[in-house]
Image (cartoon, rainbow, N blue to C red):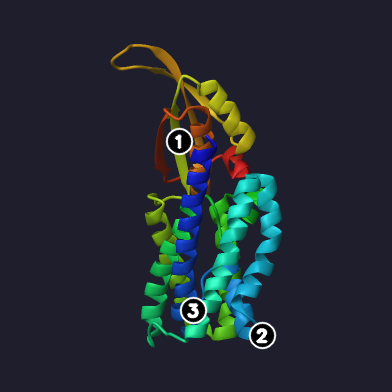
């Protein structure tokens, strides 16, 4: 078991590192030279770098520290360690790419489009490895527990605020290019994670359904529903676990299920629209 855990951890660190290299290239060689930003903490760090001329990586670490603490309460030690590793790696590789002085393009529109694609792929690799580079969604999950808003709505509000500030710093044109970058990056992330919506419905078939359901409620703080099921060939009656999660929680729920029953059948589907105060407060 320890061997399997170390192998999984090593693979995650490799993909987090690869994701950080790709994201750092997008930020330092594509976006920053053309005064285009992304949303969230990355966008705030880019603007702080522009205004003070201090390293982008320094602000990325400082701005993410409060969210690392929040993530510890919500996602646990492993996620926090991987997130912190990712933030450090992104900061380090950003400085290395900055030293090269390389610029991907002189065209702002091309930078906005391809910068978004490249950044989204990099961040997608990190998210797929059960880590994060931006604490905005973690804060949104915390706020959504107290107020009847979804995570997507809160994140959008933050980013509208960030792009408004960018409009005053860089001018309205660059702010609009930045919004294009953010939109494209979010779609690229979804493609890497093999999903196109914020919410995902999860069906889990396992003889240990009750143990799995309790673990999901405890470790992910999610409500679950037990649905009656019957085997098509065997005719055996059982129950399946159903719950709705966000895309950032996909690797976590897979880990929770795998720890209890490695042979469990998991089906994950896109949820295009979710309503109800209970769901919104949980997300």
Rendered residue at 49%/65% (across/down)? 20
Rendered residue at 49%/79% (across/down)? 97
Q: Nearer the viewer, residue 231 or 26?
A: 26
Disc 3 to disc 1, C-alpha distance: 40 Å
N-terminal-most mark, 3 or 1: 3
Q: Is residue 176 above or below residue 14?
A: below
- Nearer the observer, disc 2 or disc 3? 3
Rendered residue at 45%/58% (across/down)? 124
N-terminal-most mark, 2 or 3: 2
Residue behind mark 2: 52
Disc number for residue 101 = none
Q: Nearer the viewer, residue 60 or 229?
A: 60
Rendered residue at 49%/75% (across/down)? 27
Residue behind mark 1: 202
Other residues around mark 1 within 10 Å, as few (<14) / some (14–19) / many (≥20): some
State the image coordinates of residue 96 (x, y, percent, origin top left): 52, 78
Residues marked 3 and 1 touching at CB (< 8 Å): no
Q: Quadrant of residue 48?
A: bottom right
Q: Quadrant of residue 139?
A: bottom right
Residue behind mark 3: 97
Element marked by disc 1: strand
N-terminal-most mark, 1 or 2: 2
């Amino acid at each position: 078991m320890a061997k399997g855990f170390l192998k999984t951890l090593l693979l995650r660190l490799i993909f987090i590192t690869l994701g950080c290299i790709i994201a750092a290239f997008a930020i330092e060689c594509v976006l920053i030279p053309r005064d285009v930003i992304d949303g969230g903490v990355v966008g705030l760090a880019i603007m702080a770098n522009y205004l003070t001329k201090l390293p982008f990586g320094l602000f990325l670490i400082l701005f993410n520290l409060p969210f690392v603490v929040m993530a510890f309460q919500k996602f646990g030690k492993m996620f926090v360690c991987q997130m912190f590793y990712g933030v450090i790696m992104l900061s380090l590789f950003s400085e290395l790419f900055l030293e090269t002085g390389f610029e991907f393009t002189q065209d702002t529109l091309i930078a906005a489009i391809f910068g978004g694609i490249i950044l989204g792929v990099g961040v997608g690799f990190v998210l797929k490895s059960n880590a994060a580079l931006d604490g905005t969604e973690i804060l949104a999950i915390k706020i959504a527990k107290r107020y009847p808003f979804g995570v997507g709505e809160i994140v959008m509000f933050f980013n509208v605020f960030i792009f408004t500030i960018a409009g005053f710093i860089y001018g309205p044109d660059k702010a609009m290019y930045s919004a294009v970058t953010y939109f494209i990056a979010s779609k690229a992330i979804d493609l890497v994670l093999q999903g196109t919506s914020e919410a995902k419905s999860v069906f889990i078939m396992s003889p240990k359904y009750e143990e799995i359901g309790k673990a999901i409620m405890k470790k992910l703080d999610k409500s679950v529903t037990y649905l009656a099921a019957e085997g098509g060939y065997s005719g055996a009656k059982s129950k399946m676990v159903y719950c709705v999660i966000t895309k950032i929680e996909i690797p976590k729920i897979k880990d929770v299920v795998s720890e209890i029953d490695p042979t469990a059948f998991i089906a994950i589907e896109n949820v295009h629209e979710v309503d109800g105060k209970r769901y919104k407060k949980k997300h």
